[in-house]
Image (tube, grey):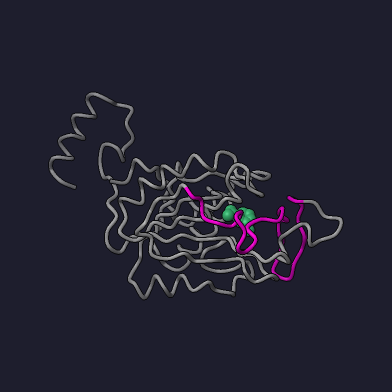
Amino acid sequence: MRRRDVILGLGAVATYPLLSARELWAKLTPSETSVLLVVDVQNCFLPGGTLAVPNGDEIIPVINSLGEKFQNVIFTQDWHTQDQVSFASNHPGKEPFETVELSYGTQVLWPDHCVQDTHDARLASGLNIPHAQLIIRKGYHSEIDSYSAFVAADRKTKTGLTGYMRERGLQEVYVCGLATDFCVNWSAMDARQAGMDVWVIEDACRAIDLNGSLDSAWKDMEREGVQRISSADIQ
Ligand code: VGL
Ligand code: ZN
């Protein structure tokens, strides 16, 4: 915190009493050990995609601006085979958004989405973060889904992202992308499990919100010490 910021902050107290504590005080400054984790910003989750998240496209400009504030940026890419166990089409008689019991627990069934090497699975063309360093794919084992960027749904199968981040000394994770209540949530929770400091940038995410999933995702994340912030909290 620089002295100038404090003085500006105090001025703001007098003038704009409704500003949040973060706006008045400590903006977060990403360092060389911080990473922006951009989760599943792919055509399938955008309007017109196979599993469109409402208003998912609105976060792209927010994420592009955030990208300029981070030295380290990692993308994730949901990357399923056509026989992926989480596709309703692979469970005769079942419809998307119903659930099934699998060996690793309850699985939500989804419309076919993000099939490998399709236009639907590509990262959104509006993303503009040329210095992003890694695209980590997940969900490619046909028998196991993976919402998390770190560990698949069986809670055993790893993507390798924890090892990559450890080896590069990346310890602070700022998570954004789609969807808040599924892949963002699970990735943030697993990053905490791996001992990282984790922030979720709410206005750089959009949710599916299935049967209260958004509320329970925020409750779970807050319980695990994931910090809920907005893009304006980062300088
Ligand atoms: C996601 C459902 C299925 C996500 C991925 O990116 O949140 N949700 N596959
Ligand atoms: Zn998926």
Q: Quadrant of residue 12?
A: top left
For residue 149, above or below residue 58: below
**Residue at 43%, 75% in the rendered image:** 163
Measured as percent of width and height from the top left, residue 108 is found at 71, 56
Q: Is residue 133 left or right of residue 3?
A: right
Measured as percent of width and height from the top left, residue 21 is found at 31, 38
Number of marks in picture: 0
For residue 121, above or below residue 153: above
Measured as percent of width and height from the top left, residue 127 is found at 44, 50
For residue 171, above or below residue 17: below
| Of 21 and 152, the residue lying toward us | 152
Magenta-tinted stretch: 96-125
| Of 93 and 119, the residue lying toward us | 119
Give the overall secondary structure of the magenta segment. loop
**Residue at 25%, 41% in the rendered image:** 25
**Residue at 54%, 60% in the rendered image:** 77
Looking at the image, which residue sits at the far left?
3
Q: Is residue 167 left or right of residue 26?
A: right
Measured as percent of width and height from the top left, residue 177 is found at 49, 50
Magenta residue check for 107: yes
Q: Is residue 192 left or right of residue 65?
A: right
**Ligand 2 image-quadrant field:** bottom right
